[in-house]
Image (spheres, grey):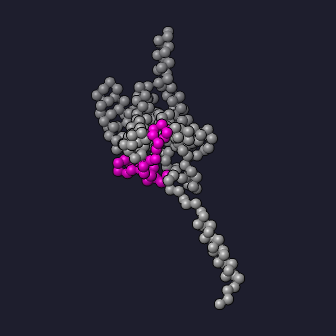
Amino acid sequence: MELSRGSFTGAATLRTYVGVQNRRPARSHSTTTLRGNAPRPVGQNMWPWTAAAFAYLCYSSYTHVRRREPPGASAIVVAAVASIVPDVIDKPLTWQFGVFRTGYALGHSAFLGLFLLGLGHVIARGSEHPRWGVAFGIGYLSHNVGDVLEALPYEPARTAFARVLWPVVRLPPEHVNGFGGKFSTLLAGYLSHLLALDPTPYFVLVSVIGVCALALWAYDGFPVLRELVVRWRTASG
């Protein structure tokens, strides 16, 4: 049977197409990607300074709405300290000791956060500082809210919310080389990302949190700093 030139041309085209398809690199599923397959920036985390700023923003907003007044200095300190507690619990236990599979476990659990909010409120009501309980709960839970907000532009909603649903939902295990190695890698990625001034969703979010917190702090009269200045003037005068 005689084949036409068109048949040979079609077969060659098919072989070329198959060869190109086979040479395409396999899609990696080990990293979360942005829409459009842009890589997720390394170091996109709720860092302590961002956590404290967001905690202030949440707690000050609460006091203005609830009590029509700015927050007190001592309650602000409590909220700021509480905002880093989730990472203080989960990161060392995961990165250094391997107790959990990921850095979003017990400390980041919304169930533990709600329990601590209620417990802190009950304990604080019987103390000389009844507002500390609410400040601690808001500061603690604000960290979890911030983690979800930071993840939403890069991950499906179910994955973003899984960060705060331990032990009901668990994330895949992290690959780490000790606390120091993991921390230095994330910090280097964070700094390079910010210095590049690349307006990614993460960069925009942390910038908005910082600017809003600073503006609200000024509106409140710079609490904490104001008390420190008064004490310094009293002690030196």
Where does residue 44 sit, x and y in percent of width and height? 52, 43
Please tell me which residue is depicted at 43% across the width and 35% down the height of the picture.
Answer: 84
Where does residue 181 sit, x and y in percent of width and height? 49, 39
Taking the magenta stretch, the answer to whether it contains residue 66 is: no
Q: Read off the magenta span.
A: 155-183
Q: How many marks?
A: 0
- Main SS of the magenta part reads loop
Please tell me which residue is depicted at 37% across the width and 30% down the height of the picture.
Answer: 132
Query: In which image quadrant can residue 91 be found?
Result: top left
Where does residue 106 sit, x and y in percent of width and height? 36, 42
Taking the magenta stretch, the answer to whether it contains residue 181 is: yes
Query: In which image quadrant can residue 114 be found?
Result: top left
Q: Is residue 108 visible?
A: no
Residue sitting farthest toward the right: 5
Where does residue 196 sit, x and y in percent of width and height? 63, 41
Q: Is residue 128 visible?
A: yes
Please tell me which residue is depicted at 52% across the width and 38% down the height of the picture.
Answer: 184
Residue sitting farthest toward the bottom: 1
| Quarter of the image that includes the N terminus | bottom right
Please tell me which residue is depicted at 68% across the width and 80% down the height of the picture.
Answer: 8
Up-down relation of residue 173 to residue 14 (above or below): above
Task: Compare residues 136 and 99 and report the one nearer the observer.
Answer: 99
